[in-house]
Image (spheres, grey):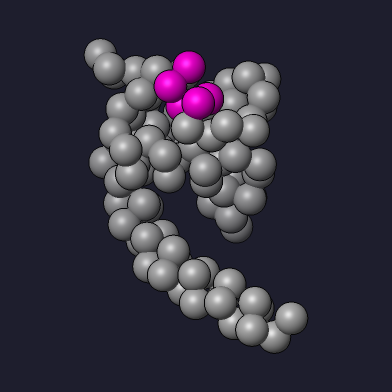
Amino acid sequence: MALFDLLGRSWSMGALWQICEHGPTTFRGLQERCEAVSPTVLNRRLKELRHAGLIDRGENGYEATTLGLELYQLLKPMRNWSHRWARCLQRSS
């Protein structure tokens, strides 16, 4: 449940996804990728994700740890499912 609590916070999963999907990035680069996130929220989420051992700061900025990449691989299949779900919702409305 602790994992779902962490990932359910605004921009936690989005930040982790962007780092895993596109590679290491600086704070400013990640903020551009996440567009609508405030600097305060992003900073808080990055601290939480670092504390959880899912990301770390490297030479090129924030990067996924081995655990973070493993979690990303587990979450990736949900992307395909969510696209199918969205199409179903569009058809029903």
**Which quadrant, please, contains the C terminus?**
bottom right
The residue nearer to you, when weighing 1 against 92, is 92
Specify the farthest residue to the right. 93
Q: Main secondary structure of the magenta part?
A: helix
**Left or right of residue 62, residue 89 in this image:** right
Picture mark count = 0
Please give the name of the residue rendered at 65% of the width and 78% of the height, measured from the top-left corner: 89
**Which quadrant does the N terminus fall into?**
bottom right
Instruction: State the residue lying farthest toward the bottom.
Output: 92
Q: Is residue 76 left or right of residue 12?
A: left
Residue nearer the viewer, 51 or 89: 89
Q: Magenta stretch containing residue 68, yes or no?
A: no
Q: Position of residue 72 (x, y in %)?
A: 36, 52
Note whether residue 87 is visible.
yes
Q: Residue at x 70, y 85 (%)?
A: 92
- Measured as percent of width and height from the top left, residue 33 is found at 47, 32
Q: Can residue 48 be seen in the rendering of this structure?
A: no
Q: Residue at 42% of width from left, 39% of height from top?
A: 18
Q: Could you say where residue 48 lies in the image, as x and y percent from the top left?
A: 55, 31
**Residue 10 found in image quarter:** top right
Q: Residue at x 49, y 70 (%)?
A: 83
Residue found at the very far top of the displayed protein: 59
Q: Quadrant of residue 44?
A: top right
Q: Which residues are magenta?
A: 28-32
Residue 31 position (above or below residue 34): above
Is 25 rendered above or below residue 6?
Answer: above
Residue 75 drawn at (x, y percent): 41, 60
Residue 29 colored in magenta in the image: yes
Going by the image, does 85 lie left or right of 80?
Answer: right
Q: Is residue 70 above or below residue 85?
A: above
